[in-house]
Image (cartoon, rainbow, N blue to C red):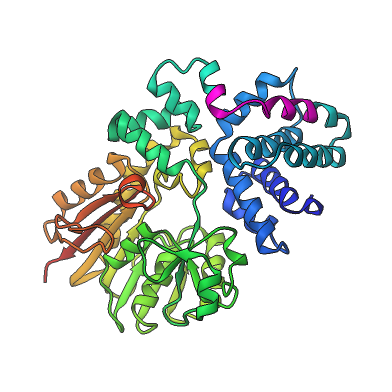
Amino acid sequence: MTAFGARGAALEALCDIRRRGVFAADALNKACEGLDSRDASMAWRIVMGVTQNRVLLDAAIDEKLAGKAEPIVRDILRIGAVQLFYMRVPQSAAVNEAVKQTKAACPRAAGLVNAVLRALAAETPDSVIARMGALDRKKELELRFSLPEWYTVALIERLGIDGAFAFAEKTGGVKPVTLIENALEPPDDAQRSAAGEPHPLLPDARLYDGAAASAPGFEQGKWIVADAGARAAVSALGLLPGQSLWDACSAPGGKALMAAMDMRGKGVVLATDVAGKKLQKIRESAARLRIGILDIRLADASSYAPERLFDAVLCDVPCSGLGVIWGKPDIRFKDSAAFGRFPAVQLKILENAAKAVKPGGVLVYSTCTFINAENEGVTSAFLEASPGFRSEGFEVPFSPGGAPSGEITLWPHIHGTDCFYIHKMRKAL
């Protein structure tokens, strides 16, 4: 498939997502190996565009299909349709390249692909939405932004219909990769300028259009990938060189590594996670960034008892993840029925991890979701049962006024970050 350059890599990634259920970003990093930065960037835009707009793309494709298409043919149709609808690619290029891919993958369907995409070239997303009878704003929200009904209900419950549209508008495009400088071994000026535009919120970060691994200096350990909201959660810890941190639910390790940078590579960072397969990724990232203070262990944060107390403990707990739809558009295809189990698990982790905080130390709880039961519901229950802890205000560099109450929810359409809930607490002396 990669013989077709960017489109071949996009098809390889979409097939990987469909067959193995991996996240789009992980599939893209694998599929884009060996591509130049231009092709990698286009593959990234195609796959993320398909994932973000799959509901509408499939609805438009199904209107033109006479019967069902094989899965790989549907993936090729999605690749062609997203170029026509959202990427301003000329019809000839989008259609002809899709037909070539089909001839290689499923020759008998080449005529079908040609006919469907030529019909779609006369359409726009707005024309599809109008014809399908979007008579109310909720239905329009679901179709225009390819959101499942359960997601729109949860979003409207939290933000109202106008806020839900603002959220969806902001997260509806392909999110550039945020590359944050390795403070211990920063990139040079040439690597900075080649890594994209300066980040609007973080002075030491860039917005990169493509797979992170292809960014100049990435393999040499000059950059770490992290959203500004994740950076804010680490900043809330207020770490200093020589201190100690337990990152209780660490995988894939970005926050532990940024914490080590804040500590200037001096001190101790215990990084634990219950997912053993993900620990190797933390080790690889630490080696690439040349950060040597991480103690990486397999452990269940809901029951693990470290042999020491820490200046700070971070509980970035497993959650429904609904707030990262901008960067992980495939989050919308999760099984929402499983979300109800999270609050009990989250509270158990927070209660256990709190035992490892030194007197006078800091405890930070964070999630990447907007569900109250997983956020304020958990921290309120914890504080009510833990009189030795109190909320403590903290600064958020890109949010005027910070979080004086000790907790904040960051929003894409308000703050320009993924949706993050952060609550900082301090243990009494």
User: Residue at 56% of width from left, 70% of height from top?
Assistant: 194
Please identify the dominant SS of the magenta region. helix
- From the top left corner, tell me how far across and down residue 422 is, in percent: 28, 55
Q: Residue at x 85, y 35 (%)?
A: 106
Q: Where is 56 relative to 189, above or below?
A: above
In magenta stretch: residue 154 = no
Q: Nearer the viewer, residue 23 or 46?
A: 46
Magenta residues span 113-127
> Is 120 part of what is drawn in magenta?
yes
Residue 248: where, in percent of width, then height? 37, 63
Q: Which of the two residues, 213 or 115, is positioned nearer the viewer here?
A: 115
Is residue 27 visible to the viewer in this orientation of the structure? no
* Residue 401 occupies quadrant: bottom left
The residue positioned 12% from the left and 67% from the top of the image is 428
On the question of residue 18 being in view, the answer is yes
Q: Residue at x 52, y 47 (%)?
A: 174
Report whether 117 appears left or right of 244: right
